[in-house]
Amino acid sequence: MSVIAIILIAAVAVLHAYILYLEMFAWEDKRTRNIFGTTKEFATSTKSLAANQGLYNGFIAAGLFWGLFAGKADVVIFFLLCVCVAGIYGALTVTKKIIFTQGLPAFLALLAVVLL
């Protein structure tokens, strides 16, 4: 894998580790509520759902780091494709900004893995 691909993959992995933190540990914080556009009441009532989502984001980050450290392009491609699909689904069902915040970085990393 090229240096550019490695940097982009690592950035996507770190992004998903950060999302894990936000959804699992900081869901009710004001800053997190501002990021996700939620109210205090909504955050309180959906805390366990958000934590579950955060765990899945952690699996994405772990898979990407595993693929990077093991030098397994097929593993990295699988997890990047998962993020791309999730980004498209999120853009269609939640908010269009998800395609830019999660889908686009994963797509660029995927292109770098495949083309560089």
Image (spheres, rainbow, N blue to C red):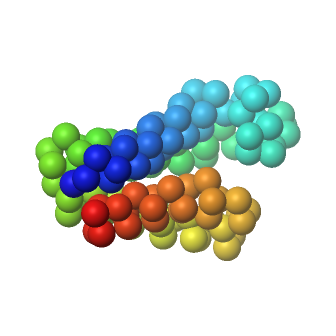
Return the x and y of residue 5 as percentages of the image width and height: 33, 53
Q: Quadrant of the image for the N terminus?
A: bottom left
Q: Position of residue 83 (x, y in %)?
A: 45, 60
Front residue of this view, candidates 22 and 51: 22
Q: Going 55% across and 40% down the picture, which residue do you hit? A: 19
Q: Quadrant of the C terminus?
A: bottom left
Residue at image point 44% right, 43% down: 11
Residue 104 in the image, given as x and y percentages of width and height: 54, 61
Return the residue nearer the eye: 33 or 8: 8
**Location of residue 44 by image quarter:** top right
Q: Vertical placement of 29 versus 98: above or below?
A: above
Q: Tell me: 5 left or right of 26.
A: left
Residue 66 in percent (x, y) is at 23, 44
Q: Nearer the viewer, residue 101 or 7?
A: 7
In the shown orientation, is residue 61 left or right of residue 26? left
Q: Is residue 45 left or right of residue 105?
A: right
Q: Residue at x 19, y 40 (%)?
A: 69
Q: Can residue 30 be seen here?
A: yes
> What residue is shown at x 80% (from left), y 37% (from top)?
34
Viewer-nearest residue: 70 or 44: 70
